[in-house]
Image (tube, rainbow, N blue to C red):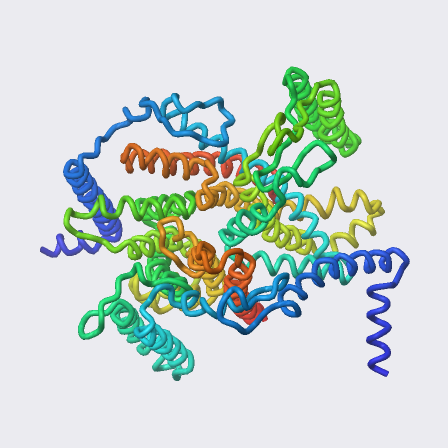
Amino acid sequence: MNRVSSLSLWRERLFGTPFTGFLTLVLAFCIAWVAVPLIRWALIDATWVGTTRADCAPGGACWVFVRARFGQFMYGLYPVDQRWRVDLAGVLFLLGVLSVIFAPQRLRLGLGVAMLAVLPPLGIWLLSGGFGLRYIETREWGGLMLTLFISIYSSLIAIPLGILFALGRQSELRVIRLISVVFIEFWRGVPIIAVIFLASLLLPLILPGGIGIDRLARAVIGLGFVIAAYMAEAVRGGLQALPKGQREAATALGLTYWKATGLIILPQALRISLPAMTNEFIALIKNTTLVLVVSILDLLGIAQASLADPNWVGMNMEAYAFSGAIYWLICFALSRWSRSLEKKRRL
Amino acid sequence: MSSFLSFINDKRVRDWIYQIAAVVFLVGLTIFFVRNASENMVKAGIASGFGFLWRTSGIEVPFVLTGYTQSDNILGLFWVGVANTMLVTVIGIVLATLLGFVLGIARLSSHWLTSAIAGAYIEFVRNIPLLFFVLFWYFGVIAALPAPRQSIGLFGIAFLNNRGLTIPLPDSVDNFRWAALIVLASWVAYGLISVWARRRKERTGQDAPLLAIGVGLILVIPALAIAWASLATRWDVPALRGFNYRGGFAVIPEFVALLAALVTYTAGFIAEIVRGGIESVPKGQTEAAGALGLRPGRILSLVVIPQALRVMTPPLTNQYLNVLKNSSFGAAIAYPDVVSLFMGSALNNTGQAIEIIAMTLAVYLVIGLAVSGVMNWYNARIALVTR
């Protein structure tokens, strides 16, 4: 019974009137026109196993290429025998995040602060080496690992800075407010690609002579500053959503500005801005691709560079499809999470 | 002593101290950076000042709208970059808006399949980096197009192949000058008529057929003028000679790829804005307007669209500014925009990083400020008047 009614519902939806029926047929034809060759290329005619380009059947996707290059797509040129360090750093990061999420409420803040203090330096040590580990230059890093590294470390700069400038923009002090507005509007007004150029050219120039600064660090700092401005606007949304009485009540209780901000305002405001901040983080992941212009090869950069391999000519579609799918999965998952957070708050 | 304590504990005094401290910190930081920069520049033998702008550039540009040649000065090169940035931005905004509105309305369609296709497209493009689309269109699509001899003809006047797009070029622009004048005059006329109509309505309560006048003056007359100009002009239609097309105007493949990427990507975001804007108008508004006896067309033009526009304007402005900023993604495929020409080529030739970076950023900041200024004015005009 239920089945019949849902079937008739679909018939009503797709073929209710002559016009909708016609529309459905036209659109279905268009979908088939695009999807059938695509599926044939990607699945039916594709070659999955093999070692060289010669193993691939013409006309279908050559996933052998992706298999052969999988290590590079993930780790770039990171030495193969040292890749466990990247994996370990990733596992530690995940464990750190999970332990904070599942910790009991009263431990959560302390644990979070501890993780923030321990994990980032530990990650840099594991990845770049020193103190007993082989030293690996950043020019050998690449692929998905670099995409995640840049995204995470840039947001470590961007989130605190963004919160600070969002507070500054709401401040009663006119000079502080002006400085914050100028900072935010400046970085929001310029293209990120120009900022990456700027960071890689200007940072060595404005620091005292003799301080060499790694080119990956330059890109991370540049991205961190731009995203800070966007994060500040995301946090501002949360700050503005709070009733004014919250700060007034906190001040009336005798809390100082920083105590009121840290204990009353930010815990509520950040919870409100979390979806917006997640969206900025998604934008950051997408924008890390721009480090390509200073010859740092993240996932998209490695995919692009792999096209130049004379042994694998004409693998454009395979490289783009694989890297695009990874970006899509990460960003789609995060955007769904952000949307569910928003829904939960609205209820 | 106690007077000092009460002085230091005075909130106003403290506020001043904090602000002065912030300013001193900033000034100190700036001095520190400037001193380092000048020392480093002396050490590296880099000149400073804007004198380099009048030096001969010697840089060849494949896509020039300003009449610049290699023997012009570097300032000329700068303007080529600005013009190319503006060109791709303006065309990109127009096309992305059109595609975005179509997608946004399709997403709201009551026809399930239409809405599902629009939704799938939107979810697809929003979660993939723009640079991916730029590279994909350039190396994946344009490079895979047929060679000039097997070009894809568009209505027999424009030809798309792996060396770009060749479009017809008018032999003279005189007729188009007249057309532009007519377009401008009819837009001004519409502005004057709408002001007059509003005043009359406030005085007498009489409605003027503003919608019909608007369509006529904003769309129909300009369209007729442009159609007349294009028909009255002789066109230089590209034709295949040897291995490539001669005549017409050759649009470089970088432009085509960048434009396609900007439009396909931004349209996904505009579609969501359009959907959100229309959905934000409560259904009761439509029902109430119907109960008052308004016809469906007038419900849409008087009740739904004005309220939806109010919600859509700020995020739409943001997207337009994003297109401006994102046009710099062309640097990744060497589209000669201001970033790749000026911040790339000119900087490599002269080494004057600070001046060149400042000028390049100024382009985006000035245009951005101008656009937000106009949009804020427009926003204030359509804002809800509460009495």
Q: Residue at x 31, y 69 (%)?
A: A79
Q: Residue at x 68, y 44 (%)?
A: B306
Q: Is residue A126 left or right of residue A57?
A: left
Q: Residue at x 69, y 61 (%)?
A: A37
Instruction: Give whichever of A235, A43 is nearer the camera.
Output: A43
Q: Residue at x 15, y 47 (%)?
A: A209
Q: Position of residue B386 (x, y in %)?
A: 61, 44
Residue B72 visible from this viewpoint: yes
Relative vertical location of residue B269 with respect to residue B84 in this rendering, above or below: below
Residue A251 visible from this viewpoint: no
Q: Is residue B124 left or right of residue A308?
A: right
Relative vertical location of residue B109 with respect to residue B255 in this rendering, above or below: below
Looking at this rendering, what residue extends furthest in the front direction?
A54
Q: Position of residue A105 (x, y in %)?
A: 39, 81
Q: Is residue A341 left or right of residue A20?
A: left
Q: Position of residue A2 (x, y in %)?
A: 83, 81
- Would you identify the image quadrant in which residue B20 lies? top left
Relative vertical location of residue B330 with respect to residue B234 in this rendering, above or below: below
